[in-house]
Every structure is written in structure tokens, then in C-alpha cells.
Image: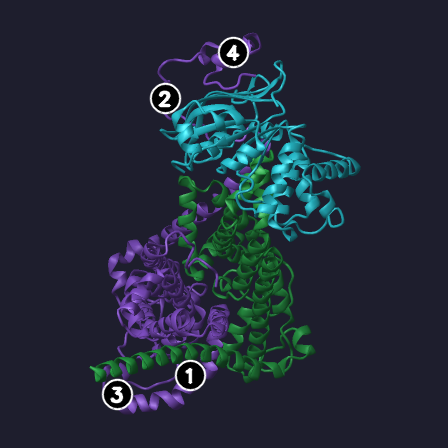
Chain colours: A cyan, B green, C purple
Amino acid sequence: MAPPADARLRLEAVRLTALYGRRAVVKDVSILFPAHTVTAVIGPSGCGKSTFLRCLNRMHELSEGGWVTGRVLLDGADVYDDAVDPVQLRRRIGMVFQRPTPFPTMSIYDNVAAGLRVNGHRGRRAQDDVVERALTQAALWDEVKDRLRASALALSGGQQQRLCIARALAPQPEVLLLDEPTASLDPAGTQRIEELCHELKRLYTIVIVTHNMQQAARVSDYTAFFYLGDLVEVGRTDELFTRPNEERTEAYITGRFG
Amino acid sequence: MSGRSLRRHITSGLMTGLVAVLSFTAVLALVLILGDLIAKGASSLNWDFFTKNPVPAGQSGGGVANAIVGTGIIVGLAALIGLPIGIGTGLYLAEYGSGRLGWIVRFVADVLNGTPSIVIGIFAWTWLVRPMGGYSALAGSVALAALMIPMIARTTEEMVRLVPHSLREAALALGYPRWRTSLRVVARTALAGIVTGCLVGVARIAGETAPLLFTALGNLNFSTSVTQPMQTLPHQIYEYASGPFAEWHRLAWASALVLMSLVLLLGVTARWAIRQRHGSAR
Amino acid sequence: MPDRYRSVTEAAYVSGRMTTLPINPATTPDAVPAPVPEPHWQTLRGRNVGDRLYRATLTALALVLPLLLVTLLAELVVGAWPAIRRFGLPFVWTSVWDPVAGVFGAAPMIFGTLASSLLALLIAVPLALGVAIYLTEFSPKWLRQPIAFLVELLAAIPSVVYGLWGIFVLIPFLRSYVVPPLRAALGWTPLFGGVFYGNSLLAGGIILAIMIVPYIAAVSREVLLAVPASQREAALGMGATRWEAVWTAVVPYGRAGLIGAVILGLGRALGETMAVTMVIGNRHDISLSVLQPAYTMAAAIANEFSEAVSDLHLAAMFEVGLVLFVVTVIVNACARLLIWRVARGTAVGSRAL
């Protein structure tokens, strides 16, 4: 499943260090995310993988005392450049969180369209099309097409998470960041979303943080292993899991520590 | 040691009974007051009561139309002034209030919340009545608004803080600028709670008399001018209750019943609103 | 794409795509990672016009409160200044109040304020604590909400309605059923001496008590709820009866907060105006007997502020207002400090109800 040798890099982190005040939680990480691939980021809890993810769409700096050195290149341009508006950036890089967070006061339709309205989309018809497309891509359309005006909270947990994915996809980002998206779902919901990843990578570039190694193995083309803020090793998933280079990687994969 | 143990258990039972009795005594006081309101006031509630103005002292009949309308105008104007400032302050505290100014504003709100309302009346008198040369409904409204703002600010802040942080993050990750996140997502989610706080605040000031004593004063006649003195229900009750005529006393009870009903209606609406939201949100 | 890689240049080298990467001297790897620079994080001030406008608007609105407090304090001091200059500190302990002669001493109203509030606390604290303990520890679950609601409703009753009830229900009741036995039994003590006309410190104290019960009860309840369940369970585990567990384990743990709740009630009692002025008698007099009329600062302002006969009289009223303000601020600050120690961070006690 290797992309051709001239595959464009979509996203790239270059010597990225993420800090809270003086404390570095992600240390000097450089990693490539090729277009139309799924990269899994694994590691024990507290190793900085979520923080790293949040650096990619400049969410980390919204935390108290959070800041970053290094660069993140989206199609070659540094997103941390002074001229870049983080708000605009986050429309090109979408994010889905651990727990489903539909906007409780909005209907299903309005939730999906939420990202569009910020962009100043006009035209009801165009918006309807976009909503339908996003819901279809999130494999939710058939289940909700008859009740788009219903409250988003009427959906089950798994459906809500897919709604959040649809919401993130509606503005047609280039990259989709998933932060442990199946952590609060049952196995059926988890499976649906994993299937989604396979389908979505045709259109988007996906980075998924997961604490579940089996999920990483199922879903991703490349896997990066983080430990205590360092990027220990990154490579093709099948090779990382069968012939890891680093001892720490092997220890983690074989379950010697969680 | 069974005698000792028995005594301990008896004590425990007695004390349990005691706190129950104390609780029911408190409830009893409420029941008595409300009961008296209804018993002594309900019979005077007729069409005249609501539509006529007070008649000269000593005569019977007449109503409190001017006071009811006056309460409506003054409380309405106070809400118009106080709600935006209060809600805005609450939003500020929730969104940007972790710095020094936020600490100061919070402290000031707490100080003002505990200030006697009559002192606020002095404040309004100094800044509005004296310069304007006379009592006015406007001064009364400003006094009530000043009473309301710290209350509303704190409840708004509390309600907005209840909104989970993850919701704010989800909006920001979608490319919402901060102001839009704060208004369209966070405040909107907390709206039921904010409205409840506002209703409760309005109910509180609707019953206030002290700040009106030397701002809006009272008026024997029907008036809708905000630059003139205006009668309000609480002030009417005060005047009538302190007066010598039995007729006045009768009217005072009826007015108190109306005022209490208004306050209760606002409070019940507030609770209903928040239950509605929670009902559909869970 | 390389199969695995550790650094950018290594990746670029392996894939032969060096030319497509914007190689920058900053990205060449060092043997030693760069040292952590000094913190200088930027707060995300909105580049957006929207963000800036929003923040400016909210800040402007938020500044109203501090402005309000400053102007309030300023005009109290300025307005009271003639009286402060004239009477100085003795204002607080002089008893003579003669508007015609221009002599003003606030001692009777200060005494009355303290006495009525203390009396109110004496009655209200057992009631309120009883309610709080009963609701948090003993009452059946289904009874909790109704009783809590009803007690809270006491706080919703306007002050003037309490006054009305006080004049026409409480005072006659006291006159007929309470004072005669009291005087018969204790009339020889200074506390219950003198003739009872109805309007009295006693009536004021009782009305105040009913008015502050819901506040003390609500805050006490929150304080008790903030006590960890482990405290009660530990006591029960050691063989205490239910009451003993509550009285010896839960209540002492929340003691600071409960005292804070009581002081908060005191703060409210100090500032109550309408109900008090309608039943307390409004007389500039210091008497040890609760059956005698009395005066409070708030009641005095209510009665005399707009009828001040001279500029000095008005200034004296301002001074009374200033004293009242300062006293309630201090009392409330102490209360909040104590409550904060047990129930941190919440806006307990700041609610309207």
C-alpha cells in the first residue's frame, strides 16, 4: 500500500517542540504525513501524542501557557508563520475529539453546517448539498436523512461521533486529525469509524491518535510511536509492528509497559 | 453498656426529630405568611383594584393601577439597563476573567451583592435625583439596575462556566473565532441558565422598596413619565401599611398578594425554563 | 516513501526528494537538541476584528461594576464629610439625635442594628442549621426537593411583605400570646422590662430571623454537601449513631463554612430595611429590653434621608450610610473567606435566592 515515490507531502512537522511554560511535553519531533494516508500515533498515556496532534492545527496554543517552537508545514507553508491566521488554518485542518461533542442547541443539520456558516457560505441549496455529502462521507446519511431537524442529542454515542466527523468534513479540509475518536464508543461504533478511515483517506490525509495498538494496526498505513514526548520511531505500520527498530518500541508493542 | 448505648440511640432519635421539627417550623412560617396573604388579600382583588387609581385618603374603593403600571415600567426599564450590563459582565468573567481585572470585577460584584439596597438608593439619589432636581422613575430604575447587575453577572458567569470545555474546543477546532465561539456556541448552550438567572434577578428587584424611597418615591396619580415620580407596588404597600386607615390596610394586603404572585410567577417560570432545557438535553 | 526514518534530512535523502523540501538551516539536525528558550508565549489575541471588538465591548461592560463601587464609596464619603468633620469618631458612640439643634449621634441606631441582628441570629441559626442538617442527612429523599424549595421561597418574599405581615399578624400575636407569659416569667429582668407597645426590638428580631433563615440554610446546605462522604462513613464505621456521625464528624469538618454561612446571614440582617422599619418602632433610644422600640441604621436612613431638615442632618444620614456600608462589607468579606475555605471557587452565597 505504499504511495508512489512522488507522492506529495501534505503535512509535515519539523523539529516541533511543544511546551507548557518551561516544561516540554513534545520534544523535537520531525515527522512526515504523506497525502492520502492514515498515520497512527501511538504510545502510553501522557506521552504527548494528543498534545502533538493539537500542535498541528494550532490548538495547543489555546491552552494555558501552551506554546511551540519548530515548524509545521502544510503543503510546504509554515502554519506557525506570523502571517497565518489560526482561525483560517483550522478550516483546512479538521479535528475530531475523544468524546462526541455535538452542539447541544443545534439540530443535526445545523451541527454539520456549523463549520460552513463560519466560512460565509451562501445559498441554501449549496449548503444542503454539502451537508448531504458530509453526512454520506461519515456514513451517517442513511440513518438521519429523515430527521435532519431533530436535535443532535437524540443520536447514540457512535452516531454522535460520526456526526462530529461529518461536521469536521463539511468545510472540506485537507487534513483530518482524530484524537482517540473511538475511546468512548462501543465495539460496533468503533468498527464503523475504523471502516470510515479506510474510505476517507481517498479524499483526506488522516492522523489518528490511539491508545489501542490493534486499532493502529488495523487502520493505518504509517505508525509513529511516542514515548515521554519523544518520537521514538515512525514507519510503515506492518513493519513497525513486526520488526521494530527500537527496543522501546518493541517493549511497548509486546505489552511490557502500557 | 447497653444502657449507655440505649441513651445514645435515644439522643440520636431525639435530635433527628428536633432538626425535622426545626425544618418544619421554617416551612410553617412560609405557609403562615402566604396563607395570610391569600386570606387577607384575595377578597379585595376585583376589577376596580386593578384598573383604578387610589382615591383620596379616608375614602373607600379605588385601586392600585398606577402602582402596577409603575412597577412594570420601572422594573422594565431597570431590566433594560441592567440585563445587558450584567450579562456582558458575566460573559467577560467567563471568557477573559482569569486575569487581574477579572479578579477585581468578581470581588466588586461580591461586595455589591452584599450591600444593603438602601445604600444603593443613596447612590442613585446623589447621581440622579439631586442633579435632576427631583424624584424620578428613571432614578429608581437606575438604582434597581445597580442592584441587579452584580447578581446577574455572577449567575451568568456560573452558568457559562458549566458549559463543558470540550464544546468550546470543538467550535475552535472548526475554525470559529473566539468571539463566535463565546457567543454562538458557549453562551447559546448556557442560555437557559442565563435566562433563569435573569428572571430570578428581575423577581428580586421587583420586590424592592428601599432603593425607591428617595428615587422614584411614589405618586398618587397615574404617571408614565420616567422623569417624574412613579408609584410602585412595594412602595404602595409600604405607604398603605404604615397608614392609619383600615381601608388602606385592606388594599395593602391585596397589593402584597399581587406582588407575591408576580414574584412567584417569575421564579416558577425560571425553574420551568431550566427544567425544559435539561429535559431535552439529557 | 522511505520505510522508516528519524529525521527530515534522512528521510529526504532516502527518498531522493531533497530538492522538493524547503531545506532550511534551522531544520538540519544537531547532535544535541536545542535548549528550551525563555517562555514568551503569545496570548491568542484575536487578529480578527471580531475578536477585538468583542473583547473590548465585554471589558467596557465589565468596568461598570468597579466604576459603580468607586463612585458609591466616593459619594458616601463626600456626602458624609461635613458630619465627619463636625462630630468625628464620637459620632459612633453619642446617643443624642437632635436634628433641630444639629447634634447627631448614631449610637442608638448602631446598637439597634447590632442588637436586632444578634437576636435574629439567635433565633435563625438553630432553625437554619436544623434545616440544613435535616435536608442533607436525615430527610427522606422525596421530601428533600419540596422542603428545600419551600425554604428558598422564604427568600423570595419581598421585605415590605414581611413588614406588612409583621405589623398585622406578628405583633398582635406577640402582644396576645407571647409577651404576657414572658413578662410574667421574666419581666423583672432588664431584658423584658418596660411596656410593650407592639413595635419593638423583639418584633424586629423575629422578622429578621425569618428573613435570613433561607440564606443561612442554603449556604449551610452547600457547605455540608461539600464535606466528603468519607467523614460520615468513617464515624459510622466506628459505631456512632446517625446523629453522632453528623454532629461529631460532618459538622465540625464544615465548621468554618457554617460559621461563614451564619456571618453571611448576619450581613443580610444588618442591611435589611423595610421589614425592620415597619416593626421596630423607629426610636432613637438605647434600651436593654427587647420589648422596647429601637432603631437601626438602615431604618433611620429610610425614614429620615429624604426629610432631612438641614444640610448637617443630610450629611449625618450620609455618614450613617457610610458606616452601614463599611460594616456590611467587612462582615460579608469575613463570611466569604470562611465559606471559600470549605467550598472553594463556587459562587455560593452570591445568588439572588
Residue A14, position in %: x, y?
Answer: 48, 19
Give the distance between the C-alpha atoms of the residues marked 3 and 1, in whole angstroms: 19 Å
Image mark 2: chain: C
Q: Are marks 3 and 4 in contact (CB under 8 Å)?
A: no
Which of the two labelled residues, at mark 4 and mark 2, occupies the earlier sequence position? 4
Q: Are marks 2 and 3 on the same chain?
A: yes
Q: Nearer the viewer, residue B102 or B209?
A: B102
| Amino acid type assigned to the residue bearing label 2 in the image | Pro
Which of the two labelled residues, at mark 3 and mark 4, occupies the earlier sequence position? 4
| Amino acid type assigned to the residue bearing label 4 in the image | Val
Q: Give the residue pinned by disc 4.
A: C14
| Residue C215 image-quadrant placement | bottom left
Which residue is rendered at x = 68% and y = 48% of the image? A107
Which of the two labelled residues, at mark 3 and mark 1, occupies the earlier sequence position? 1
Residue B57, position in %: x, y?
Answer: 58, 79
Q: Give the residue pinned by disc 1.
A: C171
